[in-house]
Image: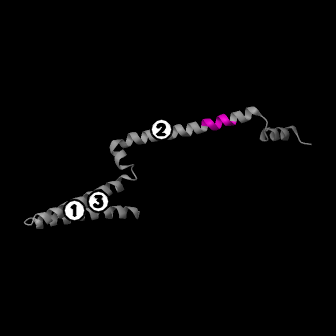
């Protein structure tokens, strides 16, 4: 025969499946937990948006911002280099000046691309 203590433990650990209060309580607790997690995530998102501002929204968060900025710099360097080469082709007298400026634009773009690939190795 089981003692009263063992019977009490058994009844506490094995709730009746037909107990409507227990099912309702567990459902309410689960819903409350989901709502709490949703509110916590919404708060974190709102705080991160406030910390980043409009510039952070434009270039991304702290993990993406350096790479995106380097990509924009590389693109700008290539655009400047191509523009300088077109100027060198159209102006015969100043072609040397424009070709040197194009070299600087390519160097700037290459440095930015080097930063992107160097950062990905870390």
Quadrant for the C terminus in the image: bottom left
108 relative position to 20: left or right: left
- Give percent across and percent down for residue 4: 86, 37
For disc 3, the marked residue is 74
- Give percent across and percent down for residue 66: 34, 54
* Sequence order check, earlier mark of 2 and 3: 2
Q: Is residue 9 above or below residue 110?
A: above
> What is the spatial separation of the Cα atoms under label 3 and label 1, in whole angstroms?
12 Å
* Sequence order check, earlier mark of 3 and 1: 3
Evaluate if marks 2 and 3 touch, with contact meaning CB atoms under 8 Å apart: no
| Residue at figure coordinates x 22%, y 62% from the top left | 82
How crowded is the residue under tag 3: few (<14 C-alpha within 10 Å), some, or many (20+)? many
Residue 101 placement: quadrant: bottom left
**Comparing marks 1 and 2, which lies closer to the viewer?**
1
Helix, strand or loop status at disc 1 = helix
Q: Mainly helix, strand or loop, the magenta region? A: helix
Helix, strand or loop status at disc 2 = helix
Q: Which residues are magenta?
A: 26-32
Residue 9 placement: quadrant: top right
Q: Which mark is residue 82?
A: 1
* Sequence order check, earlier mark of 1 and 2: 2
Helix, strand or loop status at disc 3 = helix
**Near-viewer residue (27 or 9):** 27
């Amino acid at each position: 025969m089981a003692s009263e203590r063992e019977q009490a433990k058994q009844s506490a650990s094995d709730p009746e499946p037909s107990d409507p209060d227990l099912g309702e309580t567990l459902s309410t607790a689960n819903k409350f937990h989901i709502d709490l997690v949703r509110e916590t995530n919404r708060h974190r998102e709102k705080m991160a948006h406030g910390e980043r501002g409009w510039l952070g929204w434009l270039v991304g968060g702290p993990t993406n911002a350096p790479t995106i900025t380097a990509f924009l710099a590389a693109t700008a360097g290539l655009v400047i280099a191509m523009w300088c080469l077109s100027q060198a082709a159209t102006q015969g007298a100043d072609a040397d000046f424009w070709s040197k400026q194009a070299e600087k634009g390519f160097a700037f773009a290459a440095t930015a691309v080097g930063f992107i690939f160097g950062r990905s190795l870390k």
